[in-house]
Image (tube, helix red, strand yellow):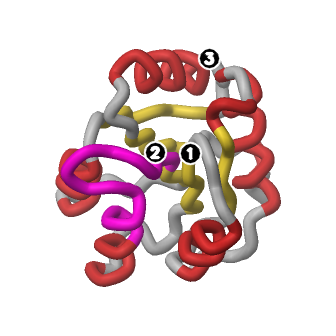
Amino acid sequence: MTDTTTKQKKILLVDDDTFLLSLYANKFSAEKAVTVEAVDSVDAALTKLREGSEPDIIVFDMVMPHQDGYDLLSTLNSEGLATKAIRIALTNEMAPEQEERVRALGVEGYIIKASNIPSEVVREVLRIAESAVSPR
């Protein structure tokens, strides 16, 4: 019998801030049960997914140039991409109407970047992933 709690998780990390992207990727990579693919745009994330990448978790910044987190979520839904992935938004603020909108688009959780140091972000992502309900 396979223990699913020890299965290595594959995370797709999407953030246009290359410093934060590198910082988060390094923090996630330090976790033995995690592998990370880091990309700096929604377009790059969608390309990876369209080419067959199947992450367990997608962690993405909500505010990015050209395409934002809402665009990412809308495209994931309309194209049926990463249907089994747990979706977690990174943001600096989340008003109630924004939370309602991202939850309607399939986000299992969100993390306020400004309120958490990178190691806390990693712990929170893994906690959300562990408690997420079954895939869509």
Give the mark nearer the N terminus: 3 vs 2: 3
Image location (x, y in percent) of residue 112: 67, 42
Give the mark nearer the N terminus: 2 vs 1: 2
> Quadrant location of residue 21?
top left
> Quadrant location of residue 52?
bottom left
The dot on residue 30 is: 3
Please give the range of residues in magenta: 59-73
Q: Is residue 21 left or right of residue 113?
A: left
Vertical arrangement, residue 105 with respect to residue 95, above or below: below
For image coordinates 43% across by 44% down, the residue present is: 12
Amino acid carrying label 2: it is Asp
For marks 3 and 2, give the one nearer the viewer.
2
Image location (x, y in percent) of residue 53: 31, 53
Image location (x, y in percent) of residue 124: 76, 41
Under circle 3, the secondary element is loop
- Give the spatial CA distance, label 3 vs label 2: 21 Å
The residue that label 2 is drawn on is 61
Give the mark nearer the N terminus: 1 vs 3: 3
- Give the spatial CA distance, label 2 vs label 1: 6 Å
Mark 2 and mark 1 residues within 8 Å of each other at the beta carbon: yes
For image coordinates 28% across by 35% down, the residue present is: 40
